[in-house]
Image (cartoon, rainbow, N blue to C red):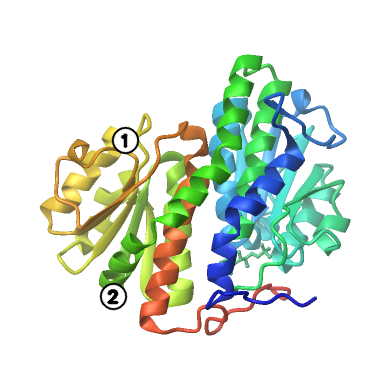
Amino acid sequence: LLVDKGNYRHFMAKEINEQPEVVSHTLANYLDMAAGRVHFPDLGVDLAQVSRVTISACGTAYYAGLVAKYWIEHYARVPVDIDVASEMRYREPPLSENGLAIFVSQSGETADTLATLRYCKANKQRIASIVNVRTSTIARESHAALPTLAGPEIGVASTKAFTCQLSVLACLAIAIAKARGEITAEQEMALVTALTEVPRHIASILRQDEIYLSVAQDLAKARDVLYLGRGSSFPIALEGALKLKEISYIHAEGYAAGELKHGPIALIDESVPVIVVAPEDDLFEKTVSNLQEVAARGGQIILISDAAPKMVGCNTAAHIQMPKVNSFIAPLLYAVPIQLIAYQTAVQIGTDVDQPRNLAKSVTVE
Ligand code: AGP
């Protein structure tokens, strides 16, 4: 298969910019957009009867699963157990009757994810996998394979596969919530409509690229960077830190914002940029108070938010203004600025963006 970079300098840039299109294709596969309804394939199990959802994956795919935990527990009110596959395969957790196990993998060949899938299958779970490569081993060994329509992803740092995984997981969360009677037809329509608007919002985020360049110039000089988020923004903070360390080799950590005072706040001084993923949702006020703690210690705050700058009540080094949207879809949008920040920083530093040192695109050995 021959894929070229087109007019882009790197595959990663091309893949980031493809997101409006591939997210739209992926959503169209799981939604009846005109009717405002989910249109989810039969997983061979009655979703109303599922007692527990188990999710496992590695790296970026794991963070997509972590967002899904927030969505499924919030909207469908089903308990979700999630772990990285390298832990879950040896942890050998007891699994529930009528359990649904979800595996997320771009390549569909990740060794630890496959081993965990086999464990869950042997323990009578219904197996559904979200894969980008339809002919992959993980797809073949699942009871149901749910494709992401991201197209081939060449850059080692996963970008468009992540937002497509989130797209499928968002539709799944609505499908389970609907089957269990946890949302009304009206609520379903509101969630589906919000999802339908994601590609347009991503396209508008991609158009304002100057701000990322200036943020990247500062980040390129940093030794350590912290990413903070709460609720479904917490996995986006983790993904932001992973993306930055993978391609720029700058040390970065993602934290749940409320954990700050339990340790990481000791790191904060003028030399530490703190990237805060903070949509103006029910938890925004809580995150703002963490922000003020950072500001009081001289931390350089880079805020990614739809809130007006005056809502924050402290100085920020940069404010990346996001569109106002239903907080359900926030993770799909906030994923994009953290990709652009990592990409531009790596370009500033001059690393091999598409093939960073020590990393393989797919980890097929343990
Ligand atoms: C993402 O940027 C990474 N390169 C990596 O964490 C990746 O997501 C992980 O190895 C899982 O791969 P998979 O989706 O192909 O299973």
Looking at the picture, tell me which residue is in the foreground, 225 or 124: 225
The residue positioned 65% from the left and 73% from the top of the image is 154
In-image side of 360 versus 269 (left or right):
right
Measured from the top left, where is residue 257 in percent x and y?
Answer: 33, 47
Q: Ligand 1 falls in which quarter?
A: bottom right
Residues under numbered marks 2 and 1 in contact, where contact means CB atoms less than 8 Å apart: no
Q: Secondary structure at mark 1?
A: helix
Q: State which quadrant residue 288 falls in.
A: top left
Residue 34 in percent (x, y) is at: 71, 27
Q: Residue furthest front?
A: 7
Mark 1, other Cα within 10 Å: few <14 / some 14–19 / many ≥20: some
Which disc, if any, is residue 258? none
Q: Which mark is residue 223?
A: 2
User: From what the image shows, is residue 98 above or below residue 218?
Assistant: above
* Kind of element beneath mark 2: loop
Which residue bears the numbered disc 1? 284
